[in-house]
Image (spheres, rainbow, N blue to C red):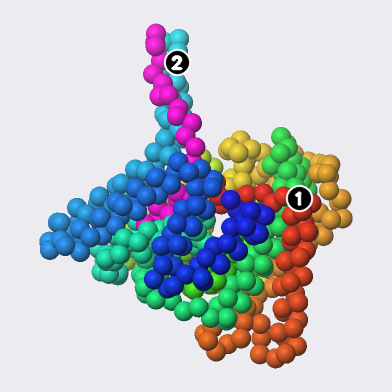
Amino acid sequence: MIFSSYEFIFLFLPLVLAGYYLLPARGRTLFLTLASYLFYGWWDYRFCGLMVLSTVIDFTAGKGLGRAHTTRGKKQWVALSVISNLALLGFFKYFDMFATTLNYGLATLFPASSIQHPVSIPLLHLVLPVGISFYTFQSMSYTIDLYKGRAKATRSFLDFACYVALFPQLVAGPIVRYHELAEQMAERTHTWGKASRGAALFVVGLAKKVLVADAVAPLTALAFDTAHPGFAAAWIGTLAYAMQIYFDFSGYSDMAVGLGLMFGFRFPINFNSPYQAVSITDFWRRWHISLSNWLRDYLYIPLGGNRLGPGRTYVNLLLVMLLGGLWHGANWTFVVWGAMHGGLLAWERCWNRATPRHAGWGRIRTFLLVCLAWVPFRAADLNQALAVWAGMTGLQGWGVVDWSTGLPLGFLVSALVMACLGAFCLPNSWRFFRVAEDEEVAPAFGSSTPQIVIRTAGVIVLFVVSIGVLMVNSSSPFLYFQF
């Protein structure tokens, strides 16, 4: 089940909201936990057991950490949590990748003609559980924070199970840490301010996904479904993918935060107009903020951060981004993407280029570098990435752009132009709907009657148009579901 589906919008969400608010406060957490497992099991009920296992391991490790009186004992419990979670994630997500790589290496070193029975590791072709990368990192952060003294252990297994399975941000984030929701699990407020902001954010996120991301998606074929794309096709296709992934993922994040507000939860911001960044360093302060912070706090700082000298800092940046790339998918293209960003972060720090003198040039340069890095992220393999890069440099000629995507050319161009204007010029959804402000005081749609009328009408129009588009073209799954 995806947020931009009829089943979710017209069946699951209304029933869950009704049941949640009809129940007394003491029964809402249990109801929300069961609803979250129903949401996750709708895709494949067999993997609900995997999430239960991860929840039980980390809750047990948390209790063990609370009882341990020695550093050694605490290390053993946190090691149990980290190793168990990484083992589950590694087995389901990376087994076939590393088996394929090892088989290729063995076949290269020992050709079949030189030995009677070449060594080969059989591939398991495992189905990747949706959202495993997100809820594994989220659940694991609980025990690490307990060990570091940044959080207190919970006595309620139900609260922790609800935290891990909470459906608004279960399958694609934002990655929320337990201490950020601990008090809200015990007691949270439900106001019209939160509800109105939540509904508005949900609708805006739906519009981003349906009206923008899905609209520009066919243009990505110009670069990535062509063997040797020319200059124009390579750049148009890559620009389209940059817009698709931004509006797809930021749209999901808006919907997740909006749903959380509907149930009384405040999730952290995950996007802050990243294509308006003036450097790669600034980009990672704005793009997928919850993952950036997770990598910083649980990888970069433990590796030494920038405390061990410039050389070690550059190595740490590269290692963290390599692992961040690998987190996104079991393909060496993601490792290349991570290496590119790690190298750019190190280059900026080395030359002190993180804050350019001219913000306009900084934005242009940063966006071009981000687009170049999106190529391996989107490509099916490294050969395809090389072909797109070759097209972007003009090595494969200007090329004739094949616009036979099944949609009118004017519509595609208009969608791409509107996406660029939105990404480069408009404020983020949080600022527009004043999500960070006190819901009890600040009105969600402005302080004056004209503002309220205009913004409310705009949200209603966006919802109607989005539903109308869904009636014609069913929405595709969110891109980050594959991670």
Q: 76 above or below 122? A: below
Q: Which portion, as a residue range, is magenta?
A: 115-139
Corner quadrant of residue 406: top right
Which residue is found at the position 12% from the left and 61% from the top?
70
1 vs 2, front mark: 1
Corner quadrant of residue 88: top left
- Counting other residues with Cα less than 10 Å from the Cα at mark 1, is it few (<14), some (14-19), or many (20 or more)? few
Residue 231's disc is: none
Which residue is found at the position 54% from the left and 62% from the top?
16
- Choose between 439 and 132: the one closer to the eye: 439
Q: On the rendered structure, is 266 left or right of 433?
A: left
Q: 100 above or below 348? A: above
Q: On the rendered structure, is 332 left or right of 410?
A: left
Q: Residue 339 in the image: state x and y as whole percent.
A: 49, 50
Q: Residue 106 in the image: state x and y as whole percent.
A: 41, 23
For mark 1, what is the residue?
473
Q: Amino acid at mark 1?
A: Asn
- Choose between 429 and 34: the one closer to the eye: 34
Which residue is found at the position 69% from the left and 51% from the top?
475
For mark 2, what is the residue?
111
Q: Secondary structure at mark 1?
A: loop
Q: Residue 60 in the image: state x and y as whole percent.
A: 25, 55
Kindly report the secondary structure that dominates the magenta region of the rendered protein. Answer: loop
Is mark 1 in CB contact (under 8 Å) with mark 2?
no
Q: Amino acid at mark 2?
A: Pro
Q: On the rendered structure, is 282 left or right of 163?
A: right
